[in-house]
Amino acid sequence: MMRSKIKSLLKNFNKRPILTGIAVFFISLGLTQFLTYKDFLLIKSYEKESVIERTNLIEKKIMAGLSNALSATKTLAYIERKYGVGDDFNHIAHEILRNNPNLDAIQLLENGTIKYNYPLVGNEMVIGYDIFSDSLRSKEAIKAIESNTLFFAGPFELRQGGSGIVGRLPIYKENIFWGFAAVVVRLETFYEIIGIENLDQDLFAVQFSKINPDSGEEELFLPHQKNTFSGYTHSIPIPLGDWKLTVQLKESQAFSKNKKAFWLRIIFSVVLGMAAWYLAIQPSILQAKVNKQSKQLKKSNERFEYATLATSDAIWDWDLVTNKVYRSENFEKLFGYTSEDFSKHPDFWNRHIHSEDFQNSKIELENTLESKQEYWEQEFRFLKKDGTYAYVVDKGIIIRNENGKAIRLIGATQDISKIKATEFAIEKEKEFLKAMMENLSEGIIACDHNGHITVLNKTTREMFGFSKGEFEISKWKDYYKCYQPDGVTLVNENETPLYKALGGERVSQQELVIRSNNGQNKIVLCSGEQIKTTDGRIIGAVVVMLDITEKRKKDKDLTKMSEDLKARAAELEASNAELEQFAYVASHDLQEPLRMITSFLKLIEKKYNPILDEKGKQFIHFAMDGSIRMRQIITDLLEYSRAGNSIQPEEFSIQEILNEVVILEKNHIKRLGAVLTHDPLPNIYAVKVQIRQLLQNLINNSLKFTTPGSKPKIHIAYQECPKYWKFSVKDNGIGVAPEYHDKIFQIFQRLHTRQEYEGTGLGLANCKKIVENHQGKIKIISNEGMGSIIFFTLMKPDTFES
């Protein structure tokens, strides 16, 4: 019934061409403008995909660029947690930065205070800075602790100048927060990582922002562009730093690109209407054209729908029947080739796949197409127009006919070169850590969560006497021979450090004896603990073994030597006491006969003076003078022996001691008209009576050896050094020739006769002994006829050994 009505209507249209033309015009206008609308939506959708694609591309660049920061901070945190960087920070940081070019500086913070920074030059002002003292930095540092992973703060003004972002990874020691491993990325480096250049000339407007923790307002990273844009906007969060990435198309081309098509389709509808009016008698022809147009529209829509299922990188559509390939504009952006370059040679794509990857890629594709799989994925290297190879991954959807034969392959190509570079860098870093661990002087042994040995470095193998190829890691329990410190009692398996560490017990300084294959015993100190991931998952355990065999042997030798020294010291102390007692008794007993001789000589001189001639008086004078000098020598020898007595040192003013000496030598100074000056003198820590004797001997020496006809001038100077006091006594006396500088400090050494200058030759020898008792040194600077300067040093309390 309905079909007959339609046929009747068509006949009426055929009978009335004008009505047919008008009807066809409006129908064509509706259809063509519907196509215009669909094209408008298609362009809008393409623009949306382009914005999303650009957003994802920038996100990938950020994540790839900052992945270096994660590996760098984890490496530094691991070394600090396991060993402590100590003085090796600069070397470790240098190696880390050398392998991570996207980082500008690396830091180690204890609690919140920056302890180390590399490079240090130009960054000295950050050392000692406490980030928790700044509210903004404190809040972002707390976020890093709460997330227990790498968290980027900023951007903000850096203390060393400029702006940048700082990534901080919390470090825990014994499950207690210790500090941060941090990296600094300047904004200039961050922009290079992102690759944002010529923003004004780009089709897209890019902006980074974040919510300020203090003000709650959104802050922009990049310079704000004053123009307003009408294109599609897409925003995604960047979790590494609570950032938001926003990309907007500056101007939508959907309307401008369809404007011409809009008017052309109106003209087309007019022409079509006129043609329908003219060809109203040819409905079949018109129907064929409509069917053809509908088929093309359906095919175009179908291509777009499948393309949206693939990745947002470079889209391609391969018709396996005709061997024709459609490629999006992104191929030129990725590889530098134009669509014309691709169309010159049918096998252009295959010719540019790396020769080492081509055969495998070809076989994989053929096998996939011949199978019943619906998806295809392959990774290979592709030659770019600039002569370099890019690592790419091809992903596609296979369309098959009703017989299961592949007739079409639609997919996308993604450039993963930076991801690969990051993987290579991580692998290189693993090799570096493995080599470093292999060459450590400490033994390292580690196992996985099942207790299977995974690490056994060279030092450990040498401890057990194994060669590198001899030891089978899987049979560890069959090899180990560990004993208690007595070297006899075998350690049970559950008492071994690795077993205890894997069970969660923290091992610290456990001493064991290892009996190696060569029969030698090694005494080792073991420390170990579990190895956990940042989320607390147990993945194994590690033990560090320190060989202390030689240390234990030296400790025994030192103990024996100490005991021998104590015994010898006791013997010397007893001997010194006996010598001191002997010296005192001897001096007393020797002086008694001398006093008697002197007394009787004086009696003889007094009683027989009238009858003695000059010769007799001279003999008595010589005898009395000799006895007096002998008595002085005995007194000086006694003082010299007492100079080494172990009297307790004390703190006192050397100025007071000098005043006492001046009083003792008052008559001597006055008789010679001597002038004695001095610098302001300090309080010192020494044996008071000995320092008084030292100053008196030196001043008396300067007064004694005076140039005839001149007045003595004596000056005492002082200089404070970190570990000792340095004094000098300068005079204008007769001086000492350089060849006698050492001789004058020896006992009984005189440079002049007693007729020229009196004395026993013990004064300066006594001074030398007193100075050396205070761990000091004494010397003279002098020339004959030019005066002398005697220098001596006295150790300070923290270095003085009484």
Image: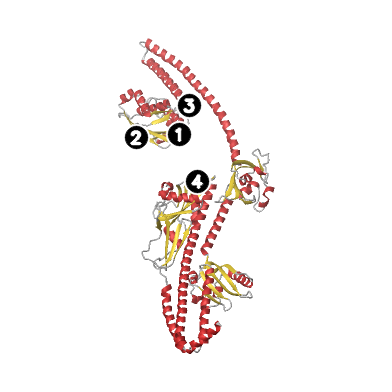
Identify which amino acid the numbered label 4 is placed on. Trp
Asked if residue 47 is positioned above or below residue 535 in the image, the reply reads below
Observer-side mark, 1 or 3, equals 1
Query: Between residues 214 and 744, which one lies in front from this camera angle?
Result: 214
Query: Picture quarter containing residue 594?
Result: top left
Query: Between residues 113 and 745, which one lies in front from this camera angle?
Result: 113
As measured in the structure, the alpha-carbon distance from the residue carrying label 4 to the one carrying label 1 is: 34 Å
- Badges 1 and 3: C-beta atoms under 8 Å apart? no
Asked if residue 780 is positioned above or below residue 456 in the image, the reply reads above
Residue under pointer 4: 178
Mark yes or no: residue 311 visible. yes
Identify which amino acid the numbered label 1 is placed on. Asp
First reached walking from the N terminus: tag 1 or tag 3:
3
Q: Picture coordinates of residue 145 (x, y %)?
A: 49, 49
Query: Between residues 5 and 507, which one lies in front from this camera angle?
Result: 5
**Looking at the image, which residue is at 52% across and 84% down?**
287
Q: Which mark is residue 786?
A: 2
| Helix, strand or loop for disc 4 | strand
* Mark 2 closeness class: few <14, some 14–19, many ≥20 residues within 10 Å: some
Residue under pointer 1: 798
* Mark 3 closeness class: few <14, some 14–19, many ≥20 residues within 10 Å: few
Count every numbered label the image shows and give the total: 4
Asked if residue 124 is positioned above or below residue 707 in the image, the reply reads below
First reached walking from the N terminus: tag 4 or tag 2:
4
As measured in the structure, the alpha-carbon distance from the residue carrying label 3 to the one carrying label 4 is: 50 Å
Asked if residue 413 is positioned above or below residue 675 in the image, the reply reads below
